[in-house]
Each structure stands twice: as structure tokens, then as C-alpha cells.
Amino acid sequence: MNFAGGRAMNARALARSYRHTAALHSPAMRASVTAGAALAGWHYGRGRGGGWWRHGNGGYGWVGPLFWPFAYFDMYDYALWGPRVGAPFWYYGYDDIYAGLFGPYDYQGLSGYLPPRDAAGGPDRLALLCGEDEIAGLPIDLIAQTIEPTEVQRTALDDLANASVTAAQKIKAACPTSIALTASGRLASMQQRIEAMIAGVATVQPPLEKFYGLLNDEQKARLNAVAEDQERKSERRRNRSLARPCDVAESSSQRWPTEEIEARLHPTDAQRAKLAALQDASSKSADMLATSCKPEEAVTPTARLAAIGKRLDVMLQAVKQVRTALDEFYVTLSDEQKAQFEAIGPRRTSVADKQDNRRYGRR
């Protein structure tokens, strides 16, 4: 990947997106912005075929050193509007753990996501994707307009609004301020991000349950009607050829590079045993995440937020499981073997980039 000339992130384009904040409430727009950021360092600004770590909806779980851009948007879209609008939340899973193990970016690529050293007060490019408090909170005005709350309900809604902003701040605070160059470092960053999201759910859940419990049947029906309207809009924008979340087995799209690891590391028998344990932990994590991918089951905002919490708990368990096995394998490697292991993902990215260039007649 080539980030020469400061092209690692198109900060101006991202800043323009934030000036039109309503656009970021569209899952399709967020996927487009994320894709542009994730692929900005490819030779022509964007590989038409997409990076190998792309999600089924065209978005990306990893943008440079950042895991889960626009996390709070994805959470509240599913909680409020349901599985059609909130589908992006459910694209996150085992493939992101795999991309954490075999990171797609090399050092040159990752360094392009940090603030420029020669630009005092320059834009924090990662922060643009981590979400801003004032636009990441729940759409309180829309909810109030829809249900026409009583005074008691308005107080509960204000409490929910405050909790929403606090949750967004917690998630934004988990945005990385440095780059991780090892698989263990990437999984640690991933774990920190998920833990912040779990904390965000815990912050919002009590006031949401209190507020929703105060609504009468007519008000709940109005919220459902708005959710259905959001769903219709999402369906019109959706590319129906995209894979739906959970349609593809979590472990099928990313094949474990056993032969390449063998050729690059020439592991000893003891190292092979640790590697086998890592593969086993990875496979179990894929099964856990596939089993817990159930976006269609919850039908109320409170139940969907609880489902978000359960899914994040499983993701956290999966990341910890793989990270523990990875650390036990990694400690047995020499410095040369570690360097060879870390080169697997960037090499795959580079090969895909070259294939994409040949496909479209570029040099």
C-alpha cells in the first residue's frame, strides 16, 4: 500500500461529510465514507474490487488502526429502527478478528492515519471516524416529535438524551491515539473498543427502559411506524446484491493461511502446537459469533439494545479467547518469525491491489 503524499485519509472529504451531518445517519453513506477511508492509500485512492477485509455491506471493520468506525451510529440504528436499517451492526464478527490477527496495513500505511507532524492543529483523522458527541447521540428531537411526550415522559426522554451523549463519549474515548504494529496490539485495541461499546450499552439501557415503559400503546405504535418508514427508505437505498449479515458462515470468508505461515516461519514442533491451539481458539470464536448472530429476533427498542449487549459480550469473549492463544504462540517466536508473521496481512493487501490494477488496466 502506498500512502505517499499524505493520501492516507482524505480529511477534506471526511470533513465535508461531517458538515452534512444528516448524511451520516444513512448507513449507506457511512459505509461509503468508511470504504473511502479504509482504501485511501491504495495506488489510485481506492481499489475498485475492495479490500479483502471488507464487510458484506461494503463497509470496513478496520480503518487503519481504528476498529469499528461510527460504532455508536450502528448501535442506535439497530436499537431504534430494527434489523433492516441496523444491519451494519451485525456485519461485525469473526472476519474482523481475522483482520486483527493478519492486519491489512503495513507501517507506512498505518502512519498515514496519524495527525500530520508539520501541521499544527491539523485534523485528527481518526477522530472524524470515531464519531462526534453532538451528532452521535440518539435522534431525540425526532422521537419527541413522533410521540408528543407528556411532561413526565419528556423528563425521561431528557435523561435518555443525556445518557446517550455520555455513551457516545465513552465510545469515542476508546478511539486509538497510536498505531499497533503487532497482532496482539491490534486485538488489544479491538478489545478496548468493544469494552467501551459495552459500557455505552450499560449507560443507555436503564433510561431507555424507563422511557419506553412510560409510553402508551399509541405512542409505541407511532415509534414502530417511524421505524417502518426508516426501513422502507433503507430498502430503497440498499444494494440488494450485497450479502446480508449472518448469511455467510463467520469462518468461511477468511481462510487460515496455514501454508504461508509454515513457509514463512518454519515453526518448530513446539511452535506448531501453540499455532494449532491458536487456530482452534480462532475456530471456536467463529462458531460462537455465528451462533450469536440473530438480528431478526428482537422486536422492541429495549430488546434490541439488550441484543446488542449480548452480541458485544460474545465478541469480547471471542477476542479475549483468540488474544490469549495468540500471546502464547507469539512468545515462542523469534524476532525474525514475528516479522514474517506480521507481513502476511500487508502482503495479501499488496497482492490484491496489484491484481485490481491489472484488472482495470492500471500500471
Image: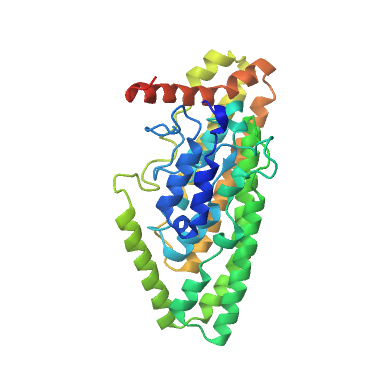
Q: Residue at x 52, y 71 (%)?
A: 140
Is 34 in front, or is 329? 34
Q: Position of residue 88 (x, y in %)?
A: 44, 51
Q: Judge by depth and name the residue closer to the eye, 132 or 352.
A: 132
Q: Residue 161 in the image: x percent, y percent? A: 59, 70
Q: Position of residue 308 (x, y in %)?
A: 52, 57
Q: Residue furthest bottom?
A: 151
Residue 7 in the image, given as x and y percentages of width and height: 53, 33
- Towards the viewer: 11 or 185: 11
User: Please, which colouring scheme is shown?
Assistant: rainbow
Query: Could you say which quadrant of the image residue 121 lies in?
Result: top right
168 shown above or below 334: below
Residue 337 is left or right of residue 286, and the answer is right
Is residue 200 in view? no
Residue at 59 percent across and 33 percent down: it is 112
Residue at figure coordinates x 46%, y 77% from the top left: 145
Q: Nearer the viewer, residue 225 or 20?
A: 20
